[in-house]
Amino acid sequence: MSSIPHNGAPGPSPGDLAAVSGRRWWILAVACLTQLMVVLDGSIVNIALPTAQQDLGFSDGNRQWVITGYALVFGALLLVGGRLGDLLGWRATFLTGLAGFAVASAIGGAANSFGILLAARIGQGGFGALLAPAALALVTSAFTDTRERHRAFALFSAVTGAGGAIGLVLGGALAEFLSWRWCLYVNLPLVLIAAVGGLWLLERQQAGEQPPLDLRGALLSVTGLVALVYGLSNAETAGWSDGSTLTWIFVGLGLLAAFVWVQARVEAPLLPLGIVLDRNRGGSLIALSVAAAGLSSLFLFLVYYLSTILGYRPLTTGVAFLPLVGAIVVAAQAGPFLIGQVGPRVPVTAGFLIASVSLFSFTRLGLASTYTGDVLPGLLLVGAGIGLVMAPAITAATDRVEHAHAGVASATVTTVQQVGYSIGTAVFSAVAAGAADEYLSTRTGHDPRVVAQSLVESYTAAFGCAGWMFVLGALVCFLVLRSGPLTRDPDSPITVAH
């Protein structure tokens, strides 16, 4: 097979070759597997973390960095990873990311100290920042037919939305029956399958005339995102009024503002601003950020509720989230029909409103609540809502983007989700802590039921806050997103020139 000419060189795109060879659905399978691996690695260690802490003997203060280290580097490098894919070719970027992710996972699984484990998680985040944009960019380019493209994004969106819950299930099973180390080792067979698929399916790309990497933009985006995500993470432990928290957040916002200023003026920007200024794409990025923020409340506080209040073991806690996975997958399949008929505004708005009803129902959880009667209906409802949001939003966020910018557009999708998740975790953690303190401030003694009820009060306060966030997201998306079906003419993409 002929090689794919790259930016500036004439010739067929990866999508054209995939369509001719009939391999586009196999490319989708490899992309979905890769996306699943990257997403679940953000949550798979959560349940196994207490065991790892006991085994390696690190402190409670260091424990959060096993999760934050991954999120920090992953979120900060996504835009750079997406741009490198556009410049160097997605095949090379994809395979490099897989190799590095495998090495980091193996080192983490064999770690005999906290320092090695943390370094491995940082390595996973860095190479994951190469993989995630490449996976979405491959799907974006492989499917040019409108109907097929919508179906492909429905499946990819289902994996994205359900990946965190699958990580909880898998992490619980591995921690209970094998070892916490297998929460990292499990990536090795997944990488092997994806690498074989990548070598078989993806064409080697020739470097055409390439614009230089925007180094100023890269530096500003990386440092800005690191400062912002670090500040938000610090708010979980130090609080929102802490001086270091506010300093890091304001520094991050200032650097990101400078990044936008630079992008509007350089000849070859890291992120062409047209990608985010289009109404449908911009509104979809807002939707994905809000969806990720709201899901963070479930993956954090519902896990706590099931384990601390209902007394579930790690595996049982993970399995309890399976209905959420099923609901997301089923609802996402309605995305192709809805976005083809009415566009993104209706399903995204409706999805947020449905999900908000679910989260408001969780505010009624108590010490005597049951999984079947009180948790399961809400999980099914929020899964249906998120499924309706994710597929249309991801489709619209990458709609009619020039082939040369597919990688950075895909990276932007993942970046807003990562930042949204970090914001949600920090905000809801602060809300939960405040609710628990307020409840205990009016009571004395150490009655175990009082302590347990304070925990319930903290969880339900976070769910209520997330519910109102979804209501606000529904309003904003209704106002910003356009009505009418999306159309995609691969020969006439929307320009994203700055």
Image (cartoon, helix red, strand yellow):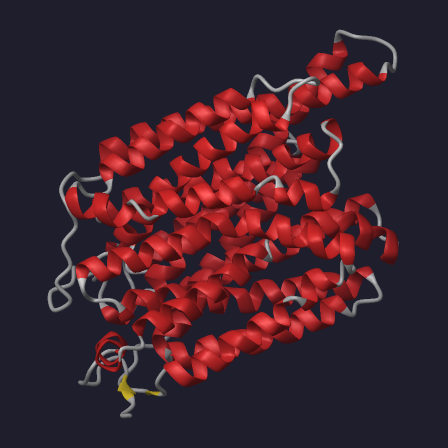
Residue most extreme to the front: 372
Whether residue 86 is situated above or below residue 435 in the rendered picture:
below
Asked if residue 290 can be seen in this view, the reply is: no
Q: Along the horizontal axis of the image, is 333 left or right of 365? A: left
Residue sitting farthest toward the bottom:
1
Q: Residue at x 32, y 87 (%)?
A: 207
Picture layout, residue 102 above or below residue 354:
below
Q: Position of residue 331 (x, y in %)?
A: 36, 42
Q: Quadrant of residue 433?
A: top right
Residue at screen point 87% across, 15% down: 446
Q: Residue at x 29, y 65 (%)?
A: 140
Residue 460 lies in quadrant: top right
Left or right: 403 in relation to 286: left
Q: Nearer the viewer, residue 324 or 118?
A: 324
- Foreground residue, 497 or 405? 405
Vertical comparison of 260 with 420: above or below:
below
User: Which image quarter holds the C terminus?
Assistant: bottom left
Q: The N terminus lies in which quarter of the figure?
A: bottom left
Residue 334 lies, with reference to residue 104, above or below; the image says above
Left or right of residue 334, residue 356 in this image:
right
